[in-house]
Amino acid sequence: MNWIHSSRAVVLGVLLAVALLTAGTVGAVQIAGFDDAPDSAEVGEEVSVEVELTDLYGDNVPDDEWTLTGDSELGGADWTVIVRDAGGDEVDRVDPVNESFEVGIDRDANHVTVDISVTGDIPEIDEFDYEDPEVEEILAMELAQLTADGDRATLADGTYYIHAYTEESREARTAIDDAHEAAEDADSDSARDDVDDAITFYNNGEFESAANTANSAQESVESSQQTRQLLIFGGAAVVVVGLLVGVIYYWRESQKPTSKLQ
């Protein structure tokens, strides 16, 4: 009996966990366009993200009337939101210049598709993490549904992030990438230690030190490889010279008379 009650409790717990995981996400609306958006951009650079929303009503969005909202962390976010009917004609439009927008979606008003674009600058970022690039991402666009009950649910696949960088951070990251590859190829523990130091500098925002340390690690590996190659070539040269000396000696010996009568 206790086992039955325990099993029921486990099942209820699993169902509750699934409900919590699925809550807050709307899956019916289809979003196209994020594939064309930039993956990364430099701090201060102006970027644009454009998408089209279709399938505005369905099993997961049962409301015939709801509010679409969008948010962005881009600096000076400039939105254009156009609601279109089945023929592609404009039915409603909002052009807010701020972090967010709201627009009503209404089946009876023949709202069929929504074109959304946002343009803004990549803002400064306060934290850098070489091993976790998501820390350096900026929310370019997040789309959500506000129902008549006041609930807010992010649209499935309705968020898009852009990796932000500075010229210095990109140079440092590239240097660390190259040094890490070189250290692994050479299986060099000392180079790995230098790479770890470079990563620490990077995470602290000390990009010049990070790049210098990473470049030093790579140069050390390359120098070690060159030295190893010279030793190999030198050893090979010694062997070749030894063989030549032996051949010459053998040839000279073979030319000497082998009989005392000669």
Image (cartoon, helix red, strand yellow):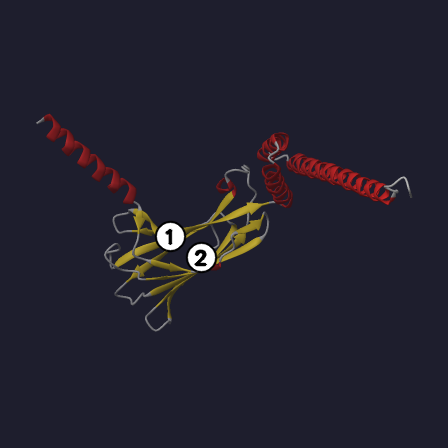
Mark 2 secondary-structure assignment: helix
Q: Which residue is mark 2?
A: 34
Front-lying residue, 235 or 34: 235
Q: Is residue 256 left or right of residue 69?
A: right
Circle 1 residues within 10 Å: few <14, some 14–19, many ≥20: some
Q: Residue at x 54, y 50 (%)?
A: 40
At 18% from the left edge and 36% from the top edge, which residue is drawn? 11
Which quadrant of the rendered structure holds the N terminus?
A: top left
Q: Position of residue 209 (x, y in %)?
A: 67, 34
Q: Which residue is mark 1?
A: 157
Along the line of sight, the residue nearer the viewer: 199 or 70: 199
**Measured Cα–Cα span from mark 1 to mark 2:** 9 Å
Disc 2 residue type (three-letter): Phe
Q: Amino acid at mark 1?
A: Asp
Of residues 195 and 63, the one nearer the viewer is 195
Q: Which of 126 and 246 lies nearest the eye of the viewer?
A: 246
